[in-house]
Amino acid sequence: MSSIVGENIKVSVFGQSHSKAIGVVIDGLPAGLTIDMEELKAFMKRRAPGGKAYATARKEADVPEFLSGLVENTTCGAPLCAVIHNKDTRSSDYENLKNIPRPGHADYPAQIKFQGFQDVAGGGHFSGRLTAPLCVAGNICMQALRERGIQVAAHIYRIAHVQDRPANLTDLTQAELLKVREKEFPVLEDEKGEKMRQAIAQAKDELDSVGGIIECVITGVPAGVGSPMFAGVENRLAAAAFGVPAVKGIEFGNGFGCANLRGSQNNDSYEIQEGRVVTKTNHSGGVLGGISTGMPIVFRVAIKPTSSIAQEQDSIRMREMENAKLVVKGRHDPCIVPRAVPCVEAVAALTIYDMLCC
Ligand SMILES: Cc1cc2nc3c(=O)[nH]c(=O)nc-3n(C[C@H](O)[C@H](O)[C@H](O)COP(=O)(O)O)c2cc1C
Ligand SMILES: C=C(O[C@@H]1CC(C(=O)O)=C[C@@H](OP(=O)(O)O)[C@H]1O)C(=O)O
């Protein structure tokens, strides 16, 4: 099982949804980095479950406890280890899933790979809950990046069929984009957010779920970061983004839309502005040939509708090799998108920080 990411800053995520604790070990952080614990707590709150109509009812404080690597909140060069204790587990909800896999979740392939030894409760190591320690690592990297003038901000771009305004930095200031992170429901246009909430509530009432798209913008990355072929900015961001459960697609800049355009529409013309090379548009999403152009890095990830839905579904009894009906129990997010926004920021921050720390 590989739950480790990074080359220079190695991030290893451990635990299961219902184990005693989940956590992260970060190896390679420079010594002398002071972590703003209040900022970290606020960041963790954006992802934490419970208390929101559009999220799972499971209640977890998600306050990390640091076991090593810090002296007076400052990194000391030793591997940093942070744990989050799981408190609100209800493993009996998952009893029937040991034999009847949920369509759309990892139960069946996990059964084959781990021969029944996998922890099914709460989704085990496959659970979205493992993004909590990922967010600890991500926010620490985000704080380190800010010192270098690099900022990461994501917003809900779409839920169901409702779309927010694109974060095109030609008509949106960086400050406006950063403000979206302070919102409980992170959209640029609040009236669109209201419609998205309604779409989630309607799906939930109908014992169903909805998916969507998250857009992330990284500003301040200098030109020249990355490399061609297999270790480019796109490759590395994509690999980390797929570490967030339920991410099913990623695109940079114009993304799949570029297939419908002509070169004259898709190219970004260069110009000199105040002695700096910039492009007039940013259709490339800030990456060409795997290397940053110095323009904002813009990418979008597609998040699937939550697989654990309350309506009866067709499945199988694996031991008996016969067809079966399944009603999923447990407390589930009717839409993963809002809680996944900080997770996407986290993987973006740890990838870019890792690429700069060489
Ligand atoms: C923040 C977050 C919360 C999630 N909550 C749920 C949930 O409540 N129920 C569920 O079935 N899946 C949830 N997921 C998604 C599953 O963990 C994921 O679909 C599953 O592990 C299979 O992986 P895959 O969808 O990437 O193939 C969540 C994911 C994230 C990132
Ligand atoms: C607890 C979290 O999300 C969980 C993600 C999840 C899944 O299958 O991914 C299943 C649910 O677990 P449980 O049945 O224990 O409530 C969610 O609540 C979290 O993200 O912190």
Image (cartoon, rainbow, N blue to C red):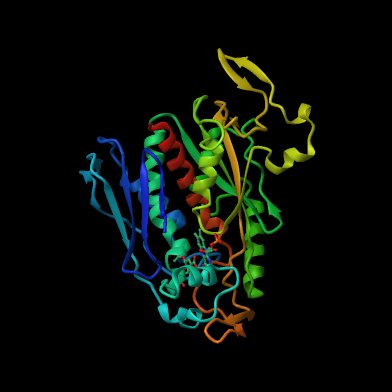
Count all numbered tags in the image, as a single digit. Answer: 0
The quarter of the image holding the N terminus is bottom left
Q: State which quadrant residue 275 falls in.
A: top right
Q: Which residue is rendered at x = 50% and y = 73% of the image?
A: 331
Q: Name the one closer to the observer, 101 or 328.
A: 101
**Residue 266 image point, x, y percent:** 73, 31
Q: Is residue 72 left or right of residue 191?
A: left
Q: Which residue is rendered at x = 24% and y = 39% of the image?
A: 77
Q: Is residue 283 left or right of residue 32?
A: right
Q: In this view, does 9 lie to the left or right of 213?
A: left
Q: State which quadrant residue 173 falls in.
A: top right
Query: In this picture, is 264 found above or below 167?
Result: above
Q: Which residue is rendered at x = 38% and y = 70% of the image?
A: 18
**Residue 284 image point, x, y percent:** 65, 32
Residue 32 visible somewhere in the drawing: yes
Residue 49 visible somewhere in the drawing: no
Residue farthest to the top, as pictured: 275
Query: In this picture, is 355 found above or below 316?
Result: above
**Residue 321 image point, x, y percent:** 58, 84
Q: Name the one closer to the observer, 163 or 2.
A: 2
Q: Name the one closer to the observer, 154 or 192.
A: 154
Residue farthest to the left, as pictured: 71
Q: State which quadrant residue 200 falls in.
A: bottom right
The quarter of the image holding the C terminus is top left
Query: In this picture, is 285 found above or below 322?
Result: above
Query: In this picture, is 39 found above or below 168?
Result: below
Q: Which residue is rendered at x = 58% and y = 17% of the image?
A: 277
